[in-house]
Amino acid sequence: MPVLPSNLPPAPSLARLLAELPSPAVRVVCTGGVTLQRVDGAWGVAAARERARDESPLLTSAMRALGLRTTPPNAAPAVRPPDAGLSGAAWGLPPESEPPIVPTPAPTSGAGHAWQPVDPDALAREAGVRAVVLLTDAADPTGEGGHLVSAAGTLAWRPPLQQLGDLPSLGAHALRLRFAVDAAEQRAVAAAMRYARAADAARQAAALLDASELTTLAVAPALFVELDALFAAASETLEGVTRLVEDAFGGSRARRTAPTARERSPQGRRAALDARLLRARGTPPEVRDLLLAVWDAHGALAAGHRRAIRRAAAAELGPPTVRVHRLAEGPWSVALPIGAESGGRDAGGAGRRGRQDAFALGWTFATETWRAATLAIYAVTSER
């Protein structure tokens, strides 16, 4: 059965997942860029603040010049003395361009608070949000040092590459896999944090523009670069695991008659990964079946997904855009829907499995590849 998110067992509750951490988590970045933060022992999400309208005087001035409303409906504008930190002069604007700013009212309801309590389990159950990165006090604000969560909802584990160090003939594979796994982990964390920044930007833009129906947001191209690199690193990891299995279970090079990863086919292309796995006759069935399932569900589509990401990045004349929407529980969610046909040919929209979020696909691809790598390494070391 293909390894798809719909085929995975239900994820455990967030409380159980957090209990596995060596130190308490203070933030959880989920799919769609939804960020949960622990405040006074309770979990919550960032909520819209009326003060957000006066935190970008340059944008506020530009909107006023275009005749757009920047104050809440039925709010009486009140002029506040210019402040050195928020005045138009600090942004290179003439003093007369400073717009009137509405004083921040005291919050009287949950919608006005800077942080809105939320039940993480209800958010996961009703909106399908899944944890991706768990951040502790020791983690860097950019996500460095965070704990990745597997697609099955448990703490992601690193393949036991150190076990290959005792086998000199497989040392090159261990080094290759280590670089690929490190790259995939870094790209997964970086892409998740980019999504979180985009979701926070959507929240602030909606509060500033009074646009609760915001659907599209322009983002930095770095988000698309990180997604493309995540698919590339996951593909490199799967390729490294396949080479390890070939050398460990494919017999000696002298007895090989079919082209391998290092031997080009007559057309000058490498043989497909599934065909190479089937040629390694000595591969344990459980290892072969898991690798083939990951290839069918993710690896064969990775090239098409990468092309779809690049096409989405180049579709706009200006900055690339992503889709945003507000969940029923309050937080904003980000998605980059892509679709690809099997064999890596881009479907130009509706693929065989429909359009899915690029990060959710890449993240599941990476974590499932690590799981297959772990099983393959244990199988290889037990045979030597």
Image (cartoon, grey):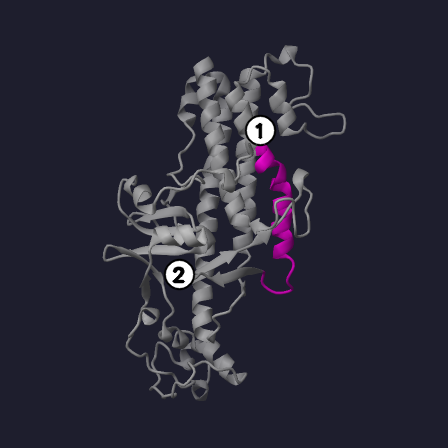
- Kindly tell me whether residue 239 is visible in this rendering: no
Question: Which secondary structure lies at badge 1?
Answer: helix
Crowding near pointer 1: few (<14 within 10 Å), some, many (20+)?
A: many
The answer to whether residue 370 is above or below residue 88 is: above
Amino acid type at circle 2 is: Glu
The percent coordinates of residue 289 (x first, y second) are: 55, 25
Q: Residue at x 45, y 51 (%)?
A: 128
Residue 292 got which mark?
1
Which residue of the protein is positioned furthest toward the left in this rendering?
40
Residue that badge 2 annotates: 329
The verdict on residue 232 being magenta is: no
Amino acid type at circle 1 is: Leu
- Residue closest to the eye, 322 or 142: 322
Crowding near pointer 2: few (<14 within 10 Å), some, many (20+)?
A: some
Numbered disc total: 2
The answer to whether residue 194 is above or below residue 244 is: below
Magenta stretch in the rendered image: 295-320
The percent coordinates of residue 219 (x first, y second) are: 53, 61
The verdict on residue 297 being magenta is: yes
Chain-order first, disc 2 or disc 1 = 1
- Residue closest to the eye, 227 or 299: 299
The percent coordinates of residue 52 (x first, y second) are: 39, 73
The percent coordinates of residue 304 (x first, y second) are: 64, 44
The mark closer to the camera, 2 or 1, is: 2
Between marks 2 and 1, how big is the CA–CA gap?
Answer: 39 Å
Question: Which secondary structure lies at badge 2?
Answer: loop
Instruction: Say which quarter of the image contains residue 98.
Output: bottom left
